[in-house]
């Protein structure tokens, strides 16, 4: 309460003596709304009844014994009985604010939020000036995602009770969640003024200053929290985030450890700790941290999704199997998870769409896309912008760099919006304008893009690691697209188009994408036909490969490998005498686990050979040492498939349903080898065995590939640029003509 209880009781008695019964009743009921067990408040209401000579009711309140029995059920945790009794009383005494309020709290405890809202609104209808009920209503509305209504309810609570410090605190935290930093700071400072030792308000104020980039003030407020409450887990956690953002890994780990010590089930702290451990390449420790998070909170879907992704990286399939039954539900209901990590766990484009939609709503739902007005005349040059963190020695630029160089400068002005911290100097010259925005907030980057007059914004990351799809949520350009980085739908209503092809997104799967499609001929994936292949004649002996054996290869990252394809691979090794499997050496744990899995299947672990990392030009040069690239299923080879095909190595894939499971098929169709895009696991295995046991066929395939790579669409970068530019222009012209986004087909 804002005022001391003793003062409230003195004022209530004074009103009673003056015959101001309604004013006295409000004071006593206000105490009971906040402290239902308060005996003096109940006694005060009984005294009011006697003073008015009423034996049964006081302005709509039930008899004291009835109220006491109802509240006793609530306090005993007998909520079902309390609900039934309370609803009966509420029908008999519909003007009892206390009944409606407590019923609202019961519904809230039972997680029946809509009913809680209805009960609180009934209480307010009886007595609009009750601040506690407005506060309770705001809490529930906020949980329901009705944030604007929640703001109004907190403000109403404060209007009727100007010293309501808890309402100021929650109002400030909600303003912060909505991105209203200035309003948040003002409300939180009011809370602290009313209650100078209010630890939670200091913590929220620290969050507000961290949000505006004032880490010094944020740190000071978090430390202030700890002077009041040394065991305040959130303050320790938030200090850890400050240290983490400043690269102070040791200090961050110490803060997260303290947070977890004081709150062992603090999921956020466990997850951030695990992320830090991964940056230190302490993968086993990170996995153990995710497991501790789940031990404290078995319903932490975010931690579970991250755990499964990391277990996938080390090929711990037994550990993953324990959670296999939960995979379909992850990220498809209430709790958003990172969509990227789920792609390798199952091939379900319907559920992948749900995960993307839920993830986009959770991360960007409150952002307001700025509407860019149509110009009076169509620009002679369209200003296009690529948004990514990968403008450095990265797979994205290996694919994209030549396309950027080839853009028609008579029709396009090409901008880069780079939010990566890596050195981008080698690629800066290929763009007309280079914007280094890695220190800017999403909303600031979007505003910069609008000031630059961008016509089309192309996001290259989507839901992948380090992506900042949120930039486009604020409206960077009138036409916004998703391309290349994330093999699936964004699920975001602010992305107008996705660049695809008819193999990657067939008609049967079209419904699982929220964007309009720009269908390119050949493959959606750009390739650089000038990529250098090192002039080095590697030998099999140098790579640790047997000279005369059939060499199956897969250079995909280890998290893409599942037990399903590995079973097939081991059967192939068993059937093809002397053959070996050449895999990318992703990490030492995966190497150990894969050798162990081979042994389980009766295959000599020595027949699995791991390729060390090397510069990409040299990696391309060693591809010819293998005979056949065996693709993974749920997430195909993407850049690695292009690498193999460019290096002269045929790729065998199995076509799935989702985008990620059809990329290699798209590439194979575009390079003129569609027969290598099989439709089932059985066909995949049979084709691999046929090629491995007939040298003439594999030689013929390699010869066809050598010819096709120079004559088909996949590596015709000049043609690709013409096609994607036609897609850009068609999409912009729809906007300029006042037409809504729609699927666009580009002809070869």
Image: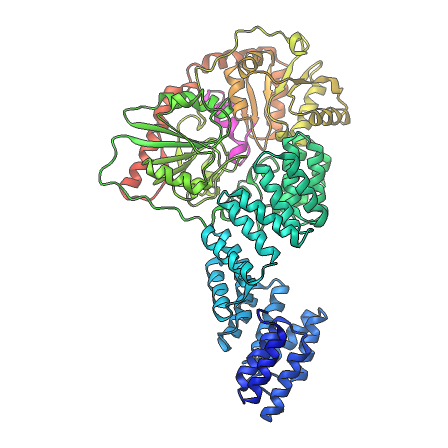
Residue 198 versus residue 362 in the image, above or below? below
Which residue: 61% across, 72% down?
A: 4
Q: Quadrant where the C terminus lies?
A: top left
The image quarter containing residue 653 is top right
Can residue 581 be found in the magenta stretch?
Answer: no
Which region of the structure is painted magenta? 654-675
The image quarter containing residue 685 is top right
Left or right of residue 616, residue 378 in this image = left
Residue 61 versus residue 464 in the image, above or below? below
How does the figure colour the protein chain or chains? rainbow
Left or right of residue 504, residue 688 in this image = right
Residue 2 versus residue 634 in the image, above or below? below
Residue 109 position in % (x across, y down):
63, 64
Is residue 588 visible to the viewer in this orientation of the structure?
yes
Towards the viewer: 662 or 338: 338
Which residue: 28% across, 27% down?
A: 411
Q: Quadrant where the N terminus lies?
A: bottom right
Towards the viewer: 166 or 626: 166
């Amino acid at each position: 309460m804002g005022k001391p209880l003793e003062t409230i009781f003195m004022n209530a008695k004074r009103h009673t003596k003056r015959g101001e019964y309604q004013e006295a009743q409000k004071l006593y009921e206000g105490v009971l709304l906040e402290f239902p067990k308060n005996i003096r408040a109940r006694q005060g209401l009984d005294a009011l009844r006697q003073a008015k000579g009423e034996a049964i009711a006081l302005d709509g309140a039930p008899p004291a014994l009835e109220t006491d029995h109802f509240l006793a059920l609530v306090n005993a945790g007998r909520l079902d009985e309390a609900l039934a009794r309370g609803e009966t009383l509420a029908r008999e005494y519909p003007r009892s604010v206390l009944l409606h309020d407590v019923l609202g709290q019961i519904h809230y405890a039972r997680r029946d939020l809509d009913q809680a809202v209805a009960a609180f609104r009934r209480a307010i209808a009886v007595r609009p000036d009750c601040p506690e009920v407005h506060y309770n209503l705001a809490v529930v509305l906020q949980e329901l995602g009705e944030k604007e209504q929640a703001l109004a309810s907190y403000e109403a609570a404060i209007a009727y009770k100007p010293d309501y410090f808890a309402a100021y605190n929650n109002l400030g935290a909600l303003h912060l969640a909505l991105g209203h930093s200035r309003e948040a700071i003002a409300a939180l400072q009011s809370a602290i003024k009313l209650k100078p030792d209010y630890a939670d308000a200091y913590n929220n104020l620290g969050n507000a200053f961290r949000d505006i980039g004032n880490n010094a003030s944020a740190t000071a407020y978090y430390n202030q929290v700890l002077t009041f409450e040394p065991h305040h887990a959130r303050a320790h956690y938030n200090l850890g985030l400050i240290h983490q953002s400043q690269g102070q890994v040791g200090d961050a780990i110490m803060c997260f450890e303290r947070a977890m010590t004081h709150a062992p089930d603090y999921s956020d702290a466990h997850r951030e700790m695990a992320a830090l451990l991964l940056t230190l390449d302490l993968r086993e420790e990170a996995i153990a941290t995710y497991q501790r998070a789940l031990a404290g909170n078995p319903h932490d879907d975010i931690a579970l999704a991250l755990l499964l992704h990391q277990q996938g990286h080390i090929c711990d399939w037994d550990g993953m199997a324990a959670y296999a039954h939960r995979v379909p539900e992850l990220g498809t209901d209430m709790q958003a998870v990172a969509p990227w990590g789920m792609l390798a766990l199952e091939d379900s484009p319907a559920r992948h769409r749900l995960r993307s939609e839920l993830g986009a709503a959770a991360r960007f739902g409150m952002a307001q896309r700025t509407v860019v007005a149509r110009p009076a005349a169509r620009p002679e040059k369209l200003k296009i912008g690529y948004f990514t963190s990968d403008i450095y020695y990265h797979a994205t630029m290996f694919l994209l760099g030549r396309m950027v160089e080839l853009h028609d400068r008579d029709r396009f002005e090409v901008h880069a919006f780079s939010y990566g911290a890596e050195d981008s100097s080698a690629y800066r010259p290929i763009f007309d304008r280079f914007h280094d925005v890695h220190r800017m907030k999403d909303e600031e980057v979007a505003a910069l893009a609008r000031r630059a007059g961008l016509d089309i914004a192309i996001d290259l990351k989507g839901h992948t690691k380090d992506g900042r799809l949120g930039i486009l949520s604020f409206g960077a350009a009138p036409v916004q697209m998703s391309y290349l980085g994330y093999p699936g739908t964004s699920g975001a209503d602010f992305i107008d188009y996705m660049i695809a092809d008819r193999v990657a997104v067939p008609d049967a799967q079209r419904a699982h994408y929220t964007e309009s499609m720009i269908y390119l001929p050949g493959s959606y994936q750009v390739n650089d036909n000038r990529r250098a292949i090192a002039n080095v004649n590697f030998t099999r002996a140098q790579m640790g490969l047997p000279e005369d054996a059939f060499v199956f290869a897969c250079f995909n990252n280890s998290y893409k490998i599942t037990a399903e394809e590995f079973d097939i691979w081991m059967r192939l090794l068993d059937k093809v005498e002397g053959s070996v499997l050449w895999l990318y050496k992703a990490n030492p744990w995966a190497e150990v686990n894969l050798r162990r899995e081979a042994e389980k299947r009766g295959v000599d672990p020595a027949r699995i050979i791991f390729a060390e990392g090397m510069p990409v030009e040299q990696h391309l040069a060693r591809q010819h040492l293998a005979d056949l690239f065996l693709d993974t299923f749920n997430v195909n080879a993407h850049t690695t498939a292009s690498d193999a095909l460019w290096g002269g190595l045929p790729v065998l894939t199995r076509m799935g349903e989702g985008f990620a499971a059809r990329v290699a098929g798209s590439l194979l169709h575009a390079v003129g080898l569609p027969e290598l895009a099989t439709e089932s696991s059985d066909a995949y295995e049979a084709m691999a065995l046929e090629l491995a046991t007939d040298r003439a066929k594999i030689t013929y395939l390699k010869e066809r590939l050598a010819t096709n790579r120079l004559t088909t669409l996949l590596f015709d970068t000049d043609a690709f640029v013409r096609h994607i530019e036609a897609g850009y222009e068609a999409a912009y012209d729809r906007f300029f003509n006042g037409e809504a986004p729609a699927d666009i087909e580009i002809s070869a």
